[in-house]
Image (cartoon, rainbow, N blue to C red):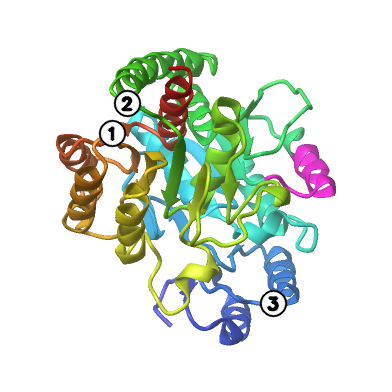
């Protein structure tokens, strides 16, 4: 063991991960468990042992953390600052930390929990433990909580802990509604809203300033949407091809308000599940990071092969008017994304002259890929790039909505 180490990152087959993590806890090491396919009973046992010893167990299936400024696994190069993040979502963590940083604030810590942590079986053991840690951390002035909707009884436990915190808390539970209102508690509907509220609070501004920033971005999106819709003879369907699962959830929060029913292989509402993830119809958003796509191949944030094929094939379908994409930069992700994605984008535009391609780029200027360089190249290729996934979803939906009124 490395002398002085206090964190172990584990990425082995799920059947071996539990024993290895337990051994690390015995050695008084915090654990980031990147491995998936770990039985839920093993997760619960590990996390209970970690809580008892005052050690974090991040995961299983935890892909993102930033600890004392060090990005771990899939993470971005962000400013240091006073916003502490607890996230049961990898790409959700990347989006909010990058947006906070790009808005001029910074991150004290970003603690991932693994997506299963907020389910009833696990009981938010790490989520609540991390919340308590950041509440007591002198370097953290603002807490930012990110998750899909926790189980009802788990949400009550989380809210009970939030009430004890003597610092501002921003929370987004994508697809869920927070009805409770507390002093210094700021619920958000999207990752973008949550990140901007946290950034404003971190800079000593009022959280309401975030609404002004979003309003200005919406004005730009509306102008772009009108221009795009005006050049189309028809406007029918949208297809979202995502590498980040949390972005698929966020898309399902935003798009239905603009264009109605949206199908998905990872639906927020089970009745909206696609029967076949490779046979898309109507308005649909796909999580290409789901297990059905990643068996035997790297994650789509690394390997663009499958999505590139779908960009070309979906663009060639006569009913498709808008393609909606995410591009996630940072450590762990594809280091040369432009080399891989520009050729299929060119082919898509060539086959469908009326096609609109809308994208968000999650990242910062100090990421290895350099966000501004990527944005500039995508825009030069004809892609409409928005500052956030939420902004991209609004623009894409608005193009479809306006086109349908013509």
Visible in this render: residue 110? no
Real-space Cα separation, disc 1 to disc 2, in angstroms: 6 Å
> Can residue 372 be found in the magenta stretch?
no
Real-space Cα separation, disc 2 to disc 3, in angstroms: 50 Å
Sequence-first disc among 2 and 3: 3
Task: Decide which of 326, 61 is in the foreground and name it.
Answer: 326
Density class for disc 2 (Cα within 10 Å; few <14, some 14-19, many ≥20) is some
Position above or below: 133 against 232: below
Sequence-first disc among 1 and 3: 3
Q: Write down the quadrant of residue 28 in the picture.
A: bottom right
Task: Decide which of 269, 83 is in the foreground and name it.
Answer: 269
The image position of residue 392, as x and y in percent, is 40, 33
Q: Name the element at disc 2.
A: loop
- The residue carrying mark 2 is 232
Looking at the rendered image, the disc whose residue lies closer to the viewer, 1 or 3, is 1
The residue lying at 53 percent from left, 74 percent from top is 35
Sequence-first disc among 1 and 2: 2
- The residue carrying mark 3 is 39
Give yes or no for contact between labels 1 and 3 (Cβ–Cβ under 8 Å): no
Task: Decide which of 69, 220 is in the foreground and name it.
Answer: 220
Q: Name the element at disc 3.
A: loop
Left or right: residue 88 versus residue 340 is: right
Give yes or no for contact between labels 1 and 2 (Cβ–Cβ under 8 Å): yes
The residue lying at 77 percent from left, 38 percent from top is 159
The stretch of residues the image draws in magenta is: 149-161
Task: Decide which of 99, 352 is in the foreground and name it.
Answer: 352
- The residue carrying mark 1 is 354
The image position of residue 23, as x and y in percent, is 60, 84
The image position of residue 402, as x and y in percent, is 44, 20
């Amino acid at each position: 063991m490395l002398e002085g180490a206090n964190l172990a990152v584990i990425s082995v087959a799920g059947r071996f991960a539990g024993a290895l993590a337990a051994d690390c806890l015995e050695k008084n090491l915090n654990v980031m468990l990147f491995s998936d396919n770990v039985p839920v009973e093993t997760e619960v046992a590990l996390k209970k042992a970690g809580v008892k010893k005052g050690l974090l167990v991040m995961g299983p299936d935890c892909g993102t953390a930033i600890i004392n400024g060090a990005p771990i696994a899939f993470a971005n190069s962000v400013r240091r600052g006073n916003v502490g993040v607890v996230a049961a979502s990898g790409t959700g963590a990347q989006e909010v930390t990058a947006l906070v940083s790009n808005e001029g604030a910074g991150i004290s810590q970003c603690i991932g929990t693994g997506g299963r942590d907020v389910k009833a079986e696990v009981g938010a053991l790490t989520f609540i433990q991390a919340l308590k840690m950041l509440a007591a951390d002198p370097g953290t002035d603002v807490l930012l909580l990110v998750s899909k909707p926790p189980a009802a009884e788990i949400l009550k436990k989380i809210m009970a802990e939030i009430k004890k915190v003597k610092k501002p808390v921003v929370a987004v539970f994508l697809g869920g509604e927070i009805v409770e209102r507390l002093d210094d508690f700021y619920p958000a509907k999207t990752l973008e809203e949550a990140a901007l509220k946290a950034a404003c609070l971190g800079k000593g501004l009022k959280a309401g300033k975030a609404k002004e920033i979003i309003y200005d971005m919406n004005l730009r999106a509306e102008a772009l949407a009108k221009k795009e819709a005006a050049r189309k003879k028809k406007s029918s369907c949208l297809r979202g091809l995502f590498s980040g699962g949390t972005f698929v959830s966020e898309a399902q929060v935003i798009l239905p308000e603009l264009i109605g029913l949206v199908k998905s292989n990872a639906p927020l509402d089970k009745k909206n599940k696609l029967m076949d993830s490779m046979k898309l119809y109507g308005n649909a958003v796909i999580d290409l990071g789901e297990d059905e796509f990643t068996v035997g191949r790297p994650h789509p944030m690394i390997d663009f092969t499958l999505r590139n094929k779908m960009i070309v094939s979906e663009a060639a379908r006569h009913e498709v008017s808008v393609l909606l994409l995410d591009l996630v930069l940072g450590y762990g992700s594809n280091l040369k994304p432009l080399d891989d994605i520009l050729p299929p984008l060119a082919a898509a535009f060539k086959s469908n002259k009326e096609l609109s391609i809308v994208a968000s780029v999650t990242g910062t200027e100090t990421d290895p890929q350099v966000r501004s360089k990527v944005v500039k190249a995508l825009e030069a290729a004809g892609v409409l790039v928005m500052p956030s996934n939420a902004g991209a979803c609004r623009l894409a939906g608005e193009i479809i909505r306006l086109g349908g009124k013509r």
